[in-house]
Every structure is written in structure tokens, then in C-alpha cells.
Amino acid sequence: VNSFVARALMRFSKPDTMFWVQDYHFLALGGQLRELGVEHPIGFFLHTPWAPHSVMASVPHHRALIESMLAYDLIGFQTEEDCGNFAGYLTLELGLPVKNGIVHSRFGLTRLAAFPIGINVDGFAAQAMRAASHPDVSRLLKSLHGERLAIGVDRLDYSKGLLNRIRAFDRLFEIQPSLKRTVSLLQIANPSRGAIEAYGNLQCELAQLVSDVNGRHGEVDWTPIRYLNKGFSQTTLAGFYRSAQVGVVTPLYDGMNLVAKEYVAAQNPVDPGVLVLSKFAGAANELTTALIVNPHDIDSMARALGMAFAMPPPERRLRWEAMMTKLQAGNIQNWFE
């Protein structure tokens, strides 16, 4: 695949082209391009996390893969931790020192840096405000009958921590039974890689867990977990985010997770919701006034959810304003620049 893409880029590129690659499938594309004689600047940005040296060293052909990556002039990561992990691999495994974010290899000089990706904050906020009148959003609000809503939006992927999230809500209703009939979770899980057995198994396990929790806690006129296996337009999701008093973003491991940023941007400034965010999402490095949780600790997640639903408006506004300041400073326009 790398060879095919490299040849296609060679065929259609102009003399002043700068190549910019943004997919983990093409980690080694830089080496292929250099072998074909490309002398253009080449950049690579990794959206997903970069594992520590101890993990990367167990990957087959890891040395050849990382050596080929050094053909890129610039390698970007979501977080300083990811960048540090990559630099640590170079030093420990390849014996290449990294000084001030620069490493020298047989390809020449490569710069390493963290570029946390952002969103179009103002655009998404305006979209969320307009979406209040969207038919799907109106139907959602009408169906709540005064309940407060938490929302989770994820690909159906084992890294997103969906099973533990449902278990945390199960635990929440056990330790705070007064929340029954007053709050619920809307979990949207868009199917992903359904042809792979592990993903199919996850879908079945998650559906069974949701059924069990609803069976234990639900009533004839109240469903604790609203679980949907389909996608929605960005406009509709923006309206859903604005309608939810709590946003739940609890992956086990994630490069950034823009759902967290979109949820914050979508909120009503007068009455914003609360973000419950995994410490293992890249977004947690910026959105430090969210309720930060360990997604492996079910009890602490349940307690954080209870705090989120009980948080008074002044504290919600203070936390939201601090997060919006971070989002504005790192919006997508600044990231492009």
C-alpha cells in the first residue's frame, strides 16, 4: 500500500509540493517516497497515541518501521507524552539522541513536536445553537419528560471504554437510587469494523450489558440507558450535545478525542453542562477543569457522574469558561497554521 501511494504521489505532485500525511497506515510512507527519489519536504501527523518503548519494541519489524519514519522532515503528535514516547524509543532502541526535538538519522534531520488538534469552536457553537430546532433534537427533548440527560458518542471500538461506562451508570443507580427516573444516558455507538470478530463480539457484549442494566433499573415509563447503533449528522449531534447536562467521554486510551471538545463548544453559556473525561484521552491535557476520571475504576466514575449531575450552576460555568478559553486558544485554525 505504501509503495502504491508513494508512486501515485510522485505522479501527480508538482515541483514545489509539500507532502503532509495524516494516517497511521502510512507510518513508513516517508521511506518509500525517499527511495523513489522524492526530495520534497514531507510531514507526518499521528492522530492516535504513540505507545511507550516497552510496547513498541514488541511490534514485529519495529526497527524497520521507525527507521523509515525518520524520512519525514516533521513528525507531529497529539500530546507531549506521545512525542516523548517516540523520542524515548529512538534513544533506547536505535541509539539516536533527540535534542530540542531534533534527531539526525541517515535521512538527515527530523523534527518532533506535539500539535494537539482542535475544532472550529465558534462554528460548532453556532451549529449547536441552530440545531435546537432540529426535528431529532426536538423529539429527544420531548421524550425526556424532565429527565436530565448524559450523552456518549463513540465509534463501537474496544478502546472507547463503553463497557466500563455502562457499568459505571449501573453502579451510579446502585449507590444513588434517588437518581432513578431523573437521569438517563443516551449512548450512540456507531458500528466500526464489523467484519472483524473482536468488534462483532464487542457489539454483542455491549448490547447484552445495556439490556441487563435496563432490566435491573428500568421502569415501564423510564429507560436508564438509551442505546443506539447508528450514526447522526454533525448538526444533529451538536444539538444532542447542547441538550445533555453531562457529556461522558471515557476512552481507555485515545489520541485526542474531539467529541470532548465538541461537547464543550456546544454548551449554552448561561447553563452549560459538565464534561466527565478520561485521564487517558489526549483532551484531558487541555480540558483540565472537566471531571477527570480513571475509566478502569468503576466506582470513581460512578461518583464523578453523580457529582456532574449535582454540580451547581456557578461551578459549571466556571469550569466551562476555563475549557472554552483552552479551546479558543487551540482551535483548528491555529492548528492549521
Image: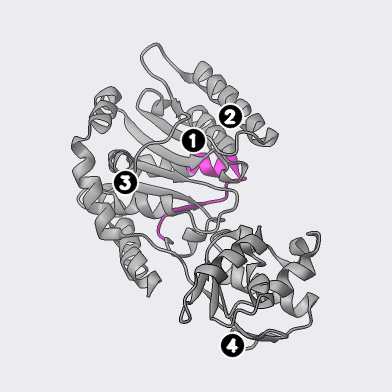
Element carrying mark 1: strand
Residue 166 place in picture, x, y as percent: 53, 33
Give the amino acid at mark 3. Answer: Gly
Label 4 Cα crowd, 10 Å radius (few <14 / some 14-19 / many 20+): few
Tag nearer the camera, 1 or 2: 1
Residue under pointer 3: 273
Mark 1 and mark 4 residues within 8 Å of each other at the beta carbon: no
For the record, the magenta segment spans 288-303
Element carrying mark 3: loop
**Between disc 4 and disc 3, whose residue precedes?**
4
Against 275, residue 329 (above or below) is: below
Label 1 Cα crowd, 10 Å radius (few <14 / some 14-19 / many 20+): many
Residue under pointer 1: 189
Q: Residue at x 36, y 59 (%)?
A: 119
**Between disc 4 and disc 2, whose residue precedes?**
4
Q: Residue at x 39, y 44 (%)?
A: 247
**Between disc 1 and disc 4, whose residue precedes?**
4
Against 257, residue 170 (above or below) is: above
Residue 165 place in picture, x, y as percent: 53, 38
Mark 1 and mark 2 residues within 8 Å of each other at the beta carbon: yes
> Image quarter for residue 97?
bottom right
Element carrying mark 2: helix
Q: Is residue 49 visible?
A: no
